[in-house]
Amino acid sequence: MNLSKLKEVRLKKKFDKILSNLSENRTVSQKEIQSVGILSTEEISSKIELESKVEAILGVRNSKIYSYKKFDKSDAISYKHFSEKDINWKGDFVEPTFQSFLEQPFDLLIGYFNENHLYLEHAVLKSKATFKAGFSEVNSKLYELEISTELENVQQFSSELKKYLQILKKLKN
């Protein structure tokens, strides 16, 4: 077993332990949404202009996005991507700009990925966002609001998200 697989196994155990200790009756912020953070994969964010579409539909500005990108030595350092190398053996993110992204208390964090992805799920779990939304196919313990739709249909996802946020009085009509 190589070191990266060993690290993944260790991280998965830590992730499962933290997830199982999450309180089932966590409190949800009643604060209106002003700031939005988005976590996705590099493949998705390169094909779809997530930031601008989410901003337009939800009526917010200055959303921030971070994408997971598989580590490659030849890639330049990016402040929009993180990789498996940005997380240590203890399960802590060590890259300072990504760490500050996770510590930012967004009013809404959108996990825009529809498959189980250890690093993205761990980032959602570690985020200090007060309200988290994502796809229902991923992990029901991560999000306060789950939406079931196709990944490619950002318009439908964002419209459904907006509808439920308005019902919860987190967005103005």
Image (cartoon, rainbow, N blue to C red):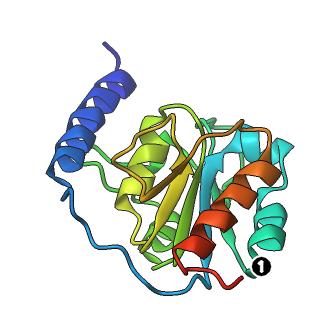
Q: Nearer the viewer, residue 12 or 84?
A: 12
Taking the spot 58% from the left edge, 82% from the top edge, the residue there is: 33
Taking the spot 59% from the left edge, 64% from the top edge, the residue there is: 164
Q: Nearer the viewer, residue 65 or 3?
A: 65
Q: Is residue 140 visible?
A: yes
Q: Quadrant of residue 131?
A: bottom left
Q: Quadrant of residue 151?
A: top right
Q: Which residue position holds label 1? A: 59
Seen in the picture, residue 70 relative to 133 is either above or below; the reply is above
Q: Is residue 79 visible?
A: no
Considering every residue shown, the one lying at the far top of the view is 1
Q: Locate the C terminus by quadrant.
A: bottom right
Seen in the picture, residue 56 relative to 115 is either above or below; the reply is below
Q: Position of residue 142 (x, y in %)?
A: 38, 51
Q: Position of residue 125 (x, y in %)?
A: 36, 55
Seen in the picture, residue 22 relative to 68 is either above or below; the reply is below
